[in-house]
Amino acid sequence: LGAVAYAERTADARQRALRTLRLRYGNRHRLVQNPVRSKSGRHLNQHEWTAFVELAEVSRRGRDIAQLVRSVRFVLAPYYTRWPSHDMRSIRVGRDPEVRSPPFEVTRVGWGYFPVTIVVTFAPELCLEPLELEHELCFNNEGSNFVHTLDLGALAAGVSSLQQRGGELTF
């Protein structure tokens, strides 16, 4: 009886893992060695940050983020208008950068933190609506990140309740 119950629980956990997609999102941070002042001269642009979306764990199931995510748009603060010349990977959507292939990230330099809205557009075959995540840039230490967990089976069945548990969101 114990071995059968264990086998059933293991099989159930394996099935849940196959239906689950875990995305890590957030920002990495480092201080700029030779910062320059802003146009107004009031602020010192000393923070280099990289906002990102990636798979939360190295795939053991053969998942590749390029097969799951079509694009990620990073909606920046409206006053953040400078487009760095080194940004050759993202395209402009309005004033905001959108990345259409991995790694899904943008790097900028600035003086202050602000909330970044991250819009993840999934591959069409997943039949998922775009996912909107909110992340406050963090300039403490090396930045911060969170994990968003999608239950693909529940989404396909039309379940839309959202729960938040300790930084992990589950549909």
Image (tube, rainbow, N blue to C red):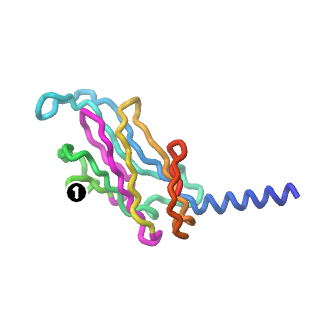
Taking the image as shown, residue 129 lies to the left or right of residue 84, namely: right
| Residue topped by disc 1 | 92
Does residue 117 belong to the magenta stretch?
Answer: yes
Vertical comparison of 157 with 83: above or below: below
For the record, the magenta segment spans 100-127
Amino acid under disc 1: Arg
Does residue 96 belong to the magenta stretch?
Answer: no
Depth order, front residue of 160/91: 160
Q: In the rendered image, which quarter is residue 152 located in?
A: bottom right
Q: In the rendered image, which quarter is residue 2 located in?
A: bottom right
Vertical comparison of 168 with 49: above or below: below
> Can the viewer see residue 101 in this picture?
yes
Depth order, front residue of 133/161: 161
Local SS, label 1 = strand
Depth order, front residue of 72/134: 134
Q: Position of residue 62 (x, y in %)?
A: 56, 61
